[in-house]
Image (cartoon, rainbow, N blue to C red):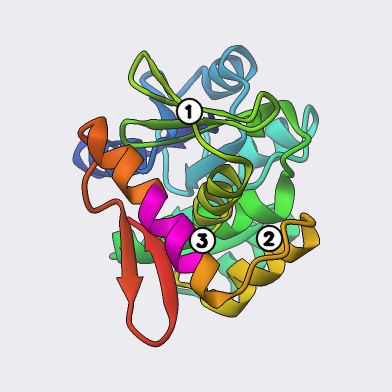
Amino acid sequence: MFKILIVEDERKIAEMIAADLQNWGYATQIVEDFQKVEDVYLSFQPHLVILDINLPYDNGFHWCERIRKHSNVPIVFLSSRTGEMDMMMALNMGGDDFIQKPFSMGMLVTKVHALLRRSYTYDNVGMDVMQHRELALHMKKGIVHIGETEVELTRNEFKILSVLFEYKNEIVQRDDMIKALWEDESFIDDNTLTVNVNRLRRKLSDHGIEDYIQTKKGQGYMLV
C-alpha cells in the first residue's frame, strides 16, 4: 500500500486530502509538529509527499531540500502563491509538481496517481499490495482479499483486475485490456473478455462487492 505524507498547516485542508486519499486505498499521515517535518518523514517513509509552501517556522522549500538529502520521493507542492517565480522555485528545489490553491481534489488525486505510476512499478515493495476500498490485490502472490477473506480468481480474472487497479478511476479500453491478456499468453478475443469480466463481477458480488467495475459503453471498463 502506498503511503502519503501530508505537510499542510490548514487542518481542514489536510484532513480533506487525507480522507479522499484514504478512499483511494492510500495510507496517509498528517504532520502535526511543523518543526519536525524531517523526523516525521524519516519515521513514516512515505512513497509521496504533499507539501505546502507557507508553513509555520520553515517553509516548504526548506523541507523539500531536507527531504531531498534522503530520497527522490515524489513531492507535490501546494500553494496559494500564484507567482511564476514560486512555481519555478518549487520545481527547481526538487518538487515534481505544483498545484495552486484553491484546487480541485480530483486534480490532486489524478496527479498523485500519475506520479506514483511513473515512480514505482509492480516489482517495488510498495506495489506488492494494492488496495482499493475493501479490495486488496497481492501482486506477487497473485491473490485477492476482500477484508480477511481470500477470493479465488482465475489467471485471466486476476490479470483483468490488476490492469483496472493500475488505471484506477480511468477508462481502460477493451482493446488495451485484450492486448494485456494476449501479452500474458492468454489469447482471448472480445467475447471472451466480456465473459471473464462478468465472471469476475459475479465472484466479487458473491462477497458483497458491487459496482466496482463499471462498463463504459463503446469504450471499456473502469474501477471506481
Q: CA distance from mark 1 to mark 3?
A: 33 Å
| Marks 1 and 2, the one that precedes in the sequence | 1
Residue 125: x and y in percent read: 72, 26
Residue type at the position of mark 2: Leu
Dot in front, 2 or 3: 2
Whether residue 24 is visible to the viewer of this picture, yes or no, is yes
- Which residue is denoted by mark 3 in the rendering? 111
Residue 28: x and y in percent read: 41, 29
Q: CA distance from mark 1 to mark 2?
A: 18 Å
Q: Which mark is residue 152?
A: 1
| Marks 2 and 3, the one that precedes in the sequence | 3
| Marks 1 and 3, the one that precedes in the sequence | 3
Residue 139 to residue 187: above or below: above
Look at the numbered disc 3 and give the secondary structure of its residue.
helix
- Which residue is denoted by mark 2 in the rendering? 181
Q: CA distance from mark 2 to mark 3?
A: 27 Å
Label 1, residues with CA under 10 Å away: few <14, some 14-19, many ≥20: some
For the residue pair 91 and 15, the one nearer the viewer reads as 15
Magenta residues, start to end: 193-199
For the residue pair 141 and 199, the one nearer the viewer reads as 199
Residue type at the position of mark 3: Lys
Residue 134: x and y in percent read: 31, 31
- Direction from residue 57 to residue 44 in the image, left or right: right
Quick one: quadrant of the C terminus?
A: bottom left
